[in-house]
Image (tube, rainbow, N blue to C red):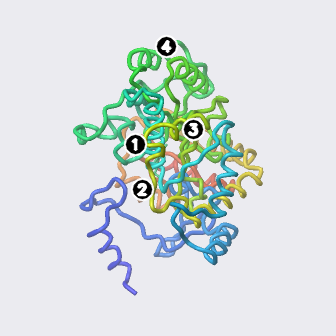
Amino acid sequence: MQDLDELLRIDKDSIWHPYSSMSSELPVYHVDSAAGVLLKLNNGQELIDGMSSWWSVIHGYNHPQMNLALEEQLKDMAHVMFGGLTHTPAIQLTEKLIAITPDSLDAVFYSDSGSVAVEVAMKMAIQYWHAKGKPSRQRFISLRSGYHGDTLGAMSVCDPDTGMHSLFSGVLPEQIFIEQPQCRFGEPCTDNDIAALKKALTKYGENCAALIIEPIVQGAGGMWFYSADYVKQARKLCDEHNVLLIFDEIATGFGRTGQLFACEHADVVPDIMCIGKALTGGYLSLAATLTTRDIHVTIDSGEPGVFMHGPTFMANPLACSAALTSIRLLVESDWQKNINRIQRSLEDGLAPCRQLTQVSDVRVLGGIGVVELKEAVDMKMIVPKFVEAGVWLRPFGKLVYVMPPYIISNDDLATLTSVMVAVIADS
Ligand SMILES: Cc1ncc(COP(=O)(O)O)c(C=O)c1O
């Protein structure tokens, strides 16, 4: 067995971490194991996880029932191709997803990551319009400060500045960007707030396949919570202009915002919806794109009569079993009460940040707490301070945020938030 120094040397020399450079001075921490809300580092230190491994590990790590579901599934098969074959975990998961997602979403396409689920959604919209005899409808309207993934199509609808579109200008399809809604969650959406979308639809609607948004919460593009009324009005405008509406619920799905899916805050049903991340309770990579009967029947009736996508690991049985168990654990628990508990604790715990001169805004929704600073954080300084204090948080830009596993205790929540307050005060 190689020693830790040797392992970390190989890591540093040869592995890219997300959005990193191999010559970076930023440390990476070696995790030996994880259980509940704790990440155990190689040196024996335990960190309270405030990230849920990027929104996904909602039931905590090493969960006995999740583990058991995978062990049982392993006895049957770890994987089998989905072309021409099917299996019970995929069928049962499909039944469950159709039951818990908004009515009228009744067809599911499985893929292996959120980015691919977004690619699939975009391709569905384009094929739909092609089948309708409107092949010019190929562009997408998207919100600034949005984030939808890192593959080229998904990236084309991410914020053009933070997504560095300038670097990829020759290959990225050019989409239409409108201002991020300024109306906050809980506020009404004024004519002024919706004006940019109205204008874009009027000007470009004829050539647009769909509007794609993260409903209610813009995640990795800015951790911004906006008005449910905006989402309602967006639905109405899309209908008026005959433009499809895609909801990217990859980050927001499965209870994180206080509703099972964030679109339920607005009581709006999209034409296409992407889910991922917490779908498997963070155990395995699985994503899905759901759509309506109208859309899949139309695609089937057009050229070439099939939907043009088919990943190798589509509907992986292990991942589907994990998803089934994760959804069961969630819906059979008093999850909404629990998210309310987390929300209250985050509100109380982060309130002192409002007094700090370094802070420009504090916002909390469901299991998400965000402290926006006036200046971008110095990652080299702040992350080691969090680790020293026994918590795992990974800020970006001006945003220090927390979204813990749903099983977190009030004591651990209090530790997370008090460390955030202390470290920000000291920054
Ligand atoms: C809203 C949203 N869409 C899409 C993605 C991409 O998902 P993945 O990283 O699984 O490709 C993310 C990931 O952070 C996301 O937050």
Sequence-first tag of 3 and 1: 1
Report how far apart the C-alphas of labels 3 and 1 lie in the structure.
Answer: 24 Å
Q: What amino acid type is highlighted by mark number 4?
A: Asn
* Residue at x-position 66% and y-position 34%: 264
SS under mark 1: helix
Comes first in the chain, label 2 or label 4: 4
For the residues marked 2 and 3, what is the alpha-carbon distance in whole angstroms? 50 Å
Residue 113 drawn above or below residue 139? below
Q: Nearer the viewer, residue 107 or 399?
A: 107
Q: Secondary structure at mark 3?
A: helix
Q: To which residue does mark 3 refer?
A: 297
Q: Is mark 1 within 8 Å of ligand 1?
A: yes
Residue 154's label in the rendered image is 1
For mark 2, give the secondary structure.
Answer: helix
Q: Give the amino acid type for the residue marked by disc 1 in the picture.
A: Ala
**Image point 47% across, 57% down: which residue?**
386
Q: Earlier in the sequence, mark 4 or mark 1?
A: 1
